[in-house]
Amino acid sequence: MGLTQQLPIDEKHTYPREYLEKNIAILLGGRAAEEIILHDFTTGAGNDIERATNLARKMVCEWGMSDKMGPLSYGKKEEQSFWVGSLPLIRITVKIRQKTLMRKLY
């Protein structure tokens, strides 16, 4: 099939939201190409989708980059105690924000 690859930025530790959104769009490019060319989906974009989802989750939950959720941290993936004790509405809202970001960039 195909391959997308990104070069690392020299020891950069902070990234603007626009840069992160462009990375998600690049990661979803393989899936979009399958849809356009093959009119079907394969497992080929699986890792890219996983990485894009993880990046979107971090943007919403860890880095406060969601306009609707605000500049709050909703815990890291490893912090399961947050998700166990949080209100279902917060969990659902986080998932909706993450999904909205992914769809916008797809």
Image: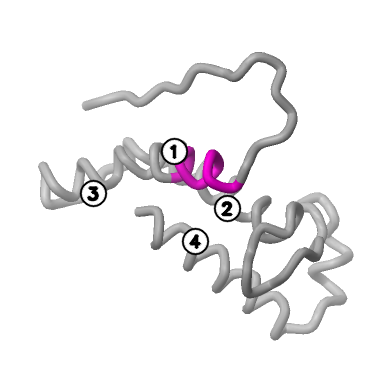
Of the residues under marks 3 and 1, which one precedes in the sequence? 3
Q: Decide whether the magenta segment is chiefly helix, strand or loop.
A: helix
Q: Are marks 2 and 3 in contact (CB under 8 Å)?
A: no
Disc ID at residue 26: none
Residue 29, compared with residue 82, is above or below; it is above
Residue corresponding to mark 4: 101
State the separation of the CA atoms marked 2 and 1: 12 Å
Of the residues under marks 3 and 4, which one precedes in the sequence? 3
Q: Secondary structure at mark 3?
A: loop
Of the residues under marks 1 and 4, which one precedes in the sequence? 1
Residue corresponding to mark 3: 41
Image: magenta residue range: 17-24
Residue corresponding to mark 2: 56
**Quadrant position of the N terminus in the picture:** top left
Residue 60 left/right relative to 73: left
Crowd band around label 3 with a 10 angstrom C-alpha radius: few (<14), some (14–19), many (20+): some
State the separation of the CA atoms marked 3 and 1: 13 Å
* Amino acid type, residue under disc 1 in the picture: Asp
Residue 98 left/right relative to 38: right
Residue corresponding to mark 1: 48
Of the residues under marks 2 and 1, which one precedes in the sequence? 1
Label 1 or label 4, whichever lies nearer to me, is 4
Q: Secondary structure at mark 4?
A: helix
Q: Please name the residue shown 20% across and 43% down the image.
A: 34
In the rendered image, residue 31, in percent from the top left (x then y), is placed at: 29, 45
Q: Secondary structure at mark 2?
A: helix
* Amino acid type, residue under disc 2 in the picture: Ala
* Amino acid type, residue under disc 3 in the picture: Phe
Identify which residue, 102 or 2, lies in the foreground. 102
